[in-house]
Image (cartoon, grey):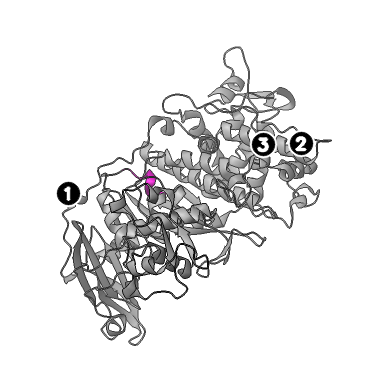
Amino acid sequence: MSFLREKEILQALALSDESEDESEPGDSDDETFTLPTFYLDKPDDQRKSASTTVPDSHPTEQDLQMPSTSTVNMLIASMVTAAGQKPNNTSQPMKYKNVQWKKGSLSVSADEISFLGSEKLPDNILALSSPLQFFKYFFSDNLLEKICEESCRYSVQKTPEKPIILSPNELQKFIGVSVLMSIVHLPNVRSYWKETIGSSIVKETMPVNVFETIRRYLHFNDSLLAVPAGEPGHGRLYKLRPVIDSLNEKFRSIPLEESLSVDEQLCPTKGRSYLKQFLPMKPRKWGYKLFVLSGVSGFAYNVEIYTGQENREDCRPAGEPDLGASANVVVRLCRIVPCDVHHKIYFDNYYTTLPLMVFMKNRGIYCLGTLRRNRVPGLKLQSESDMKKNPRGTCEECVAKVDSVDVSAVAWKDNKVVTLMSTFVGSEPTKKVKRFDRKERKTIQVDCPKIVIVYNLHMGGVDLLDSIMARYRIIMRTKKWYIKLFYHFLDVTIVNAWILHRRVAAQLGIQNTMTLAAFREDLALSLCQVGLSITPKRGRPSFEVEGDLVKKRKKSSAAVYPPQPVRQDRLEHWPIHKDTRQRCKFPSCKGKTLIFCEKCDVTLCITNKKNCFKDFHLK
């Protein structure tokens, strides 16, 4: 609303006996402003006149009697609504002014901030053993069926004369081939089916035309039901929403670690999209920006794709304050974090604000992050220009109490001046750290405050996730933004499954020697060759047969064994006779036999006393 329109309203509400006396009933040259109905319904002693004549010359401020703010707001809202516009109800971000900072040190007892939750995994997670089972825990059968259903519907919409029929088993094989391509890189997709440099496993899994047909019609939501842009309820991530919600729900089901970190992530792309962002500090600058809540291990518990719509007031739950665009990211990601369990959240200076620290502390969640000083005025710290003149290792701290919450701000000079803010740790006690002095050309010892040590120890969860994903990434080119993000979520799911696999092994006391490359290879072979869905057995898994097979693999003359899900899928394991006898490959069996499994390609004996063929495929 323009300033002239607001001034016209104020003039209409002004009480001026002189103007009323001067106005004549038959005067039609003057403009007349009629008040809304709700204002006319008030008693005479509580309202102004129903119509007030506005003279051509605008009166001065001394001639006007200013109405109450609530009355003006009600009039503005009614006039905007009558004009067909929505009133601006956007609340202002929460701010704290006149905070009294003073020199001091934050001291919090260990019992006060001790973690009250549990990081132990439940029995249904401990029952998982193979890479396929860990992957299928996150990427469930319901999600596979949803993707198959929407892909078939999309093919009918695009080519009704020649629709496709996609089954969950074929979709699993498509994902398996995609994961295999992330391990072995060739110039293009069709190269994997070449006779010279192609992969035999890929060629045996599905023809190249079937693979490209699935990739062409891969879809996740009904496009005909999407709300058009500009209308209420429109979502920019509608095409990928089922995948995001399903995977995030599974990620959140894993018990949270005590220390969590929030940071941005980039899905690199060269395609054109309104979602593409530029992040100058990332190795790859252009791509889709995501916000991730991760543990110290690199496990992603919650992922949010940046679209520009997340900070709208209608998307914010009732009772959740507006802390600013950057701080609201932390609040949204931490909705899954339980209150009063004393989790610790770490983030960088993009997110750190004083209202965020206070809000999270009132929920029983402690925070620590680097700080931009212009966001918190009045800090009792030296300016950065003065701090640069001090020797390396100089530290200053000030504290304040905001809404009964103790907050500490620490400035420390290393190569540069860094400022941090926390609600549970301060500068004391300091610790000696090694730094290289360029002037003296030697390693020296400098004082480092505790807050810096704690921050460096727990902040790198999202960066660790990025480094793990960058080793083996699905890099198939596509012009569709939601397909590119789908590949990204596949990589996040596989890394989460691998980290969970290591976490289960550590809790059960099992020595885990499977690397990420071996995990992805086992998963890809299982997805390509498995015939039936695997239902985990109740209780803890039996590692006797699998452990003995691993020992046999270490021998130079040992045969190549199929992955456990393929070995136990009970599909097309036909016994075939060989011309020569070979040693039975079942552990602890020393017999020789002519029978081998056609699918697994291992020799297994069948006699009247024992059946190694049956035991190999069941145990």
The residue that label 1 is drawn on is: 111
Which range of residues does the magenta coloring cover? 333-338
The secondary structure type at the circle numbered 3 is: helix
Mark on residue 349?
Answer: none
Q: Is residue 568 left or right of residue 42?
A: right
Q: Are marks 1 and 2 in contact (CB under 8 Å)?
A: no
Look at 74% across and 32% down and name the residue there: 165
Q: Is residue 407 left or right of residue 160?
A: left
> First in sequence: mark 3 or mark 2?
3
Mark on residue 156?
Answer: 2
Q: Is residue 90 visible?
A: no
Q: Is residue 548 visible?
A: yes
Mark 2, residues whose alpha carbon is within 10 Å: few (<14), some, or many (≥20)?
some
> First in sequence: mark 1 or mark 2?
1
Q: CA distance from mark 1 to mark 2?
A: 62 Å
Camera-side residue of 471 and 313: 313
Q: CA distance from mark 3 to mark 1?
A: 52 Å
The residue that label 3 is drawn on is: 150
The secondary structure type at the circle numbered 1 is: helix
Look at 63% across and 18% down and name the residue there: 606
